[in-house]
Structure formats: C-alpha cells, structure tokens
Amino acid sequence: MSPRRKNKKPRAGTRRRAPERGRRRPKKKTCYFCDQNQGYVDYKDVGLLRKFMSDRAKIRSSRVTGNCPQCQRKVAIAIKNAREMALLPYIKR
Ligand SMILES: [Zn+2]
C-alpha cells in the first residue's frame, strides 16, 4: 500500500475564503469623540458612556462603536472610573 493518504484534509489556515460576491461594503464608521473635537471623555457623562456599553454593561469594542484606538482607550478608562464611582454597573444580569 502506498503511504499517500486519501481524502487529504486541508491544513489549518489554508482554507480558501468564499468569494465576496454580493457582500455589502460596510459603512465607514467615524469616531464619535474625534467628530466632536473633544480631547477628553468625561466619566460623569453617564448617558454618553452608556452608548459605548452593551446591555450587559460590558464595554463595546471599537469594531462595534467605530472609535479610534486613542478614544477607545479613553472611553474604556472613563467607564472604569465611572464604575468605581458607582455611576455605572460592573455587570448586569
Ligand atoms: Zn477618536
């Protein structure tokens, strides 16, 4: 018998992606804070910070919110500050 395998499995990472036909081009998201030309994120602005949190009170990723890396970091720090000050919850069930 030959040592060659039948039904060769594709190696991890070599799988071809499906052709991107008819796929919608995602809308370009803009960073909210860069738009506002605001150099800081206020941790006391709970209503604004809630927009960057999920309904389970988790911090939304920049992929979802469209924030730039600099502002995303500021938002995350502001949310964590607000949590320590008991303005926002850590978890919500
Ligand atoms: Zn930004």
Image (cartoon, rainbow, N blue to C red):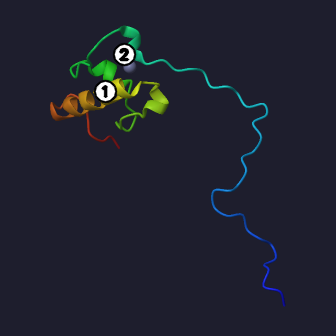
Q: In this figure, which residue is indicated by the disc labeled 2?
A: 33
Q: Quadrant of ligand 1?
A: top left
**Disc 1 residue lies near ligand 1 with CB under 8 A:** no
* Numbered badge on residue 16: none
In the image: residue 5, left or right of residue 28: right
- Mark 2 near ligand 1 (CB under 8 Å)? yes
Q: CA distance from mark 1 to mark 2?
A: 9 Å
Residue 68 is situated, as x and y percent measured from the top left of the image, at: 41, 24
For the point 17% across and 32% down, the residue is 86
Looking at numbered disc 2 in the image, what kind of residue is underneath it?
Phe
Q: Report which residue position mark 1 lands on.
A: 75
**Amino acid of disc 1:** Val
* Residue 41 in the image, given as x and y percentages of width and height: 27, 19
Please tell me whether mark 1 sits on a helix, a strand or a loop.
Answer: helix
Residue closer to the observer: 18 or 78: 18
Answer few, some or many: residues within 10 Å of disc 1's Cα (few below 14, many 20 plus, some between 14 and 19).
Answer: many
The location of residue 1, given as percent across then percent down, is: 84, 91
The answer to whether residue 82 is above or below residue 9 is above
Q: Is residue 16 left or right of residue 1?
A: left
Label 2 element class: helix
Is disc 2 surrounded by few (<14), some (14 to 19) or many (20+) residues within 10 Å? some
Q: Quadrant of residue 79?
A: top left
